Image: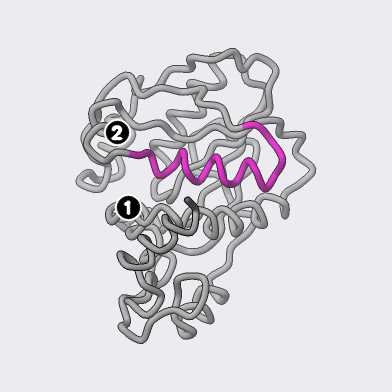
Amino acid sequence: MNRAIDALLGLIYPRSAACMGCGSRAGFPREWLCEDCRQLLAKRWVGPGQPPPGGAFQGAAYGYHYGGPAGGLVRNLKYRGVTRLAEGMARAMANAFEAIQPTGADCVVPVPMHRKRLKQRGFNHAALLAKATAARLELPALDALVRVRNTRQQVRLPAAKRRRNMDGAFEAVMDVRGRRVILVDDVCTTGATANACAKALMNAGAEAVYLLCFAVAAEDKSSV
């Protein structure tokens, strides 16, 4: 069965097709990236970073600076549905988080999608990243949050409106009292979504929340 699935995926996304980082038709011999993008991505490594301002995070880590190859990987996962990218992206995320250990974190929670948007897209990219990252960190992945309001897409809003857009958008639906949580998303831009999630987790009794994203963008970039 796995071979049949791999063969089918090979027809849809052959390794001689476009690089997932830059779109080059030169192909990608490994890791879904052409050699130029692999080298450029390595130069954009972040690791430990500052949490978004105004939140309740005890720490943060990011794989790469957004843009270039990192942006291409995010877009191909998120909008083209190349879900097999999540495994390699999670490897980078786990490495980034290990750079801020020891944190005592005991579970991984994805930023949730509203049920209507989830139905439209068919999958939650943050949940894929959270599950793969949790496996690498040997921690449980918990769907501890729900999005109770179908908010406007953040990419269309300036920073101030992003924060207002997220107010009260999330609720905890699992017992996280006393837990030290890693919150996972694909990209952190202004941090409005992440801060709203952290607030919901802390209000539900979480002891600490850490942010972990594949990429981090400047606040004035409309990337997510």
Q: Secondary structure at mark 1?
A: loop
CA distance separating discs 1 and 2: 13 Å
Q: Is residue 89 left or right of residue 222?
A: right
Tell whether 116 sits left or right of 15: left
- Which amino acid, mark 2? Leu
User: Residue visible at 44% across and 60% down?
Assistant: 6
Where residue 106 appears, as percent x and y from the top left, is: 71, 30
Give the percent coordinates (x, y) of residue 145.
46, 23
Q: Residue at x 44, y 65 (%)?
A: 70
**Residue of label 1:** 81
Q: Earlier in the sequence, mark 1 or mark 2?
A: 1
Q: Residue at x 51, y 49 (%)?
A: 213
Left of 63 or right of it: where is 140? Answer: right
The span picked out in magenta is: 123-140
SS of the residue under disc 2: helix
Display coloring: one colour
Pointer 2 residue: 118
Prevalent SS, magenta region:
helix
* Residue 151 place in picture, x, y as percent: 25, 30
166, above or below 47, in the image: above
Q: Residues within 10 Å of mark 1 (few under 14, many from 20)?
A: some
- Residue 112: give x, y in percent of width and height: 40, 31
* Magenta segment includes 40: no
Check disc 2: other Cα within 10 Å, few if <14, some if 14-19, many if 20+: few
Q: Is residue 157 left or right of residue 87?
A: left
Q: Residue lying furthest right in this view?
A: 102
- The image quadrant of residue 103 is top right
Question: Relative to 93, does residue 107 appear above or below in the rendering?
Answer: above
- Residue type, label 1: Gly
Residue 184, above or below 65: above
